[in-house]
Amino acid sequence: MAANSRLTIATHALAWLALAHRRGQEVLTSEQVAASVNTNPVIIRRSLGDLRRAGLVEVRHGAGAGWSLAREPEGISLLEVYDAVDAQPPFGLHRTEPSLECPVGRGIRPALSGVYDRVERVMRRELADTSIADVLRETLLNQPEDRKAQRNEE
């Protein structure tokens, strides 16, 4: 089972847009964002489209076309990004009904539903408490060769 990376891709794109803006570049093309994420620009355009519909990014057409943040990175929470890209809950129940002939099959859904609901509530709280600015700050701090440059930018 592959993990859903939509939240990661969208967060990466937003952090890159935030850093570009900090460095004086008002917009980035989907190709520039895709190069950073190391994925196809079509995937980035889909993700940025979701983020635009949620009011997190803006698109400029024509001369100087590209994408930019619609708000300051401190004002964009990872929960907003998560909801914008329609990321899936961390855990899911069986796709089909388990055997009701089995005592575990009869009770597994209710037993796990409460646990999964609590995990999702905690996850959503954590995402709500983390901004794109937080992610960018942590990203730059985790790069030894960029620590000096990052301190100079702040």
Image: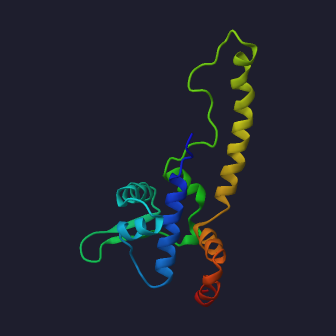
Q: How was the colour assigned to the protein in this rendering? A: rainbow
Location of the C terminus (image quadrant): bottom right
Q: Can you name the residue that lies furthest to the left here?
A: 62
Vertical side of 109 occupied by 31: above or below:
below
Location of the N terminus (image quadrant): top right
Q: Is residue 107 left or right of residue 9?
A: right
**Where is residue 58 shown, x and y percent of the image?**
39, 66
**Where is residue 147 shown, x and y percent of the image?**
64, 84
Q: Please identify the quarter of the rendering in which residue 55 is found.
A: bottom left
**Where is residue 106 shown, x and y percent of the image?**
71, 16
Vertical side of 148 occupied by 75: above or below:
above
Residue plotted at (42% across, 60% down): 39
**Number of numbered discs:** 0
Residue plotted at (51% across, 74% down): 18
Q: Please identify the quarter of the rendering in which residue 30 is found.
A: bottom left
Residue plotted at (43% across, 65% down): 57
